[in-house]
Amino acid sequence: MRKPQQDGIMMNHSSLLRRRWAQRLGGAALAALFTAAAGASPAETPPDPPILHFEASDEYSFAAARITVDARLMPGAELTVSLTSPSGNREVLTMSRDGHRHTWTGQLGEVGTWQAEAVVDGPSGSGSERLTASGSVSLRAGEPSCSVSVSAPEVPTHYLDAHIVVDTCEASAQTGQIATRYARVLRDGVQVATLDSTNTCERSFVVPGGGDYEATLEVVDDRGVSGSCTSPGLGVDARYPRFWPTLDFAAGTFRTSRADIVDGPRSALVGGSGVGIMIPHHSDEDRTTSFHARAGGGRAHNNWLGSAVDFSITRQTPGGFFGAGAGLWGIGDNDLMDAGIFGTGGFNLPYYTRAGPVQMLFEIRVFARHITDFSQNYSGMLGVRYNFRPTHLIHTR
């Protein structure tokens, strides 16, 4: 009866031993697991590549720039941000930092494409991969806005009063102000005027005749950046007169043999005026041949009165004229009346082309009666001629 009880006790004891060993093994495994977990370091999260933003305040070379780099740096890592100009100059930037954001602001002053690059290098010996980011900005010179136009009267206008107007008022700088404005006016491709429009943006000048006109303008702003442009063409037609009247006043000396002077030839001071008509061969050319018919009268210091009729051929030049002619002197005085030949010439006062309105003239005459004795038969005159011509008319087309 005692044995069964003893066997039950033995079985309970064996189960208890197994349970204790299991608890010990489980505790040891759990302790080993905790020990391993405590001895291991937390996993390192690799950093993301930097994000770079490169922006300019404007598209022109005077723009301000801002570079921002968002980068999460590992302990010991280094961020380098560089800026390369269009000419190739590279500069390492000093960045301001606010958390993970790094910022630089500055001025860009060169035309072309600017390159910015951000480089993140990991701690030394860590074997971390180099991370980069880049951006670019392209800038233009910011040339001034150029504008020029030419205009002329729409109705026919007298040549000496007709003006072409060169308007540069619409030109403006992208920033600051226009420093200089210079316009060149071309007629049929040849420059005829240079106008400084810096202080007066609307300038005018007397047109020198018909043709196709245009103006080129160069403007420079206060940064030294220039811009240029050309106006649309302006056609000007010239209407030249086929003839025009003249009026002249002259004075000089006269010497010839007279029947009422018994002791030989004498000299006399003479003066007078004449009216005529001028007929040009090519009225629209600077250099042309003209026919001049003239009738005049005068008085000598001895109260002699006389008249003359002359015909001459003259050559017009840009500055005046020269020519030769023949006429009859002393009409109405049988003792004095004589034919003669003369040379004449003059220059414009003031200077205008194609027979200006006022001309200085001179004349040397030799009389036919004693033509071989020049020293006793001549006259010399100096005077002023007025050309009552409407010059030519112009109108735009």
Image: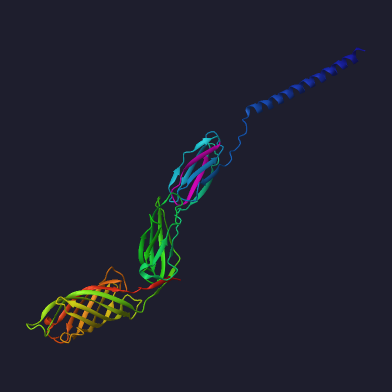
Q: In the depicted view, which residue is nearer to us: 268 or 289?
A: 268
Q: Position of residue 183 (x, y in %)?
A: 39, 61
For residue 231, say whether it is visible.
Answer: yes
In the figure, is residue 350 to the left or right of 147?
A: left
Q: In the depicted view, which residue is nearer to us: 278 or 223?
A: 278
Point out the stretch of residues depicted in magenta: 100-120
Q: Quadrant of the N terminus?
A: top right
Kindly give the residue lying farthest to the left in the view shown: 263
Residue 329 picture quarter: bottom left
Q: Position of residue 78 (x, y in %)?
A: 51, 37
Q: Residue at x 44, y 70 (%)?
A: 155
Magenta run includes residue 238: no
Indicate whether 226 appears above or below 387.
above
Q: Position of residue 148 (x, y in %)?
A: 44, 61
Indicate whether 17 appears above or below 372.
above
Q: Position of residue 390 (x, y in %)?
A: 36, 73
Main SS, magenta residues: strand
Q: Residue at x 62, y 31 (%)?
A: 42
Kindly give the residue lying farthest to the front in the view shown: 303
Residue 303 picture quarter: bottom left
In the figure, is residue 231 to the left or right of 325?
A: right
Residue 388 picture quarter: bottom left
Total numbered circles: 0
Indicate whether 332 appears above or below 319.
below
Q: In the depicted view, which residue is nearer to us: 257 or 367?
A: 257
Q: How is the image coloured?
A: rainbow
Kindly give the residue lying farthest to the right in the view shown: 1
Magenta run includes residue 101: yes
Indicate whether 222 appears above or below 212.
above
For residue 124, say whether it is visible.
Answer: no
Q: Residue at x 37, y 73 (%)?
A: 392
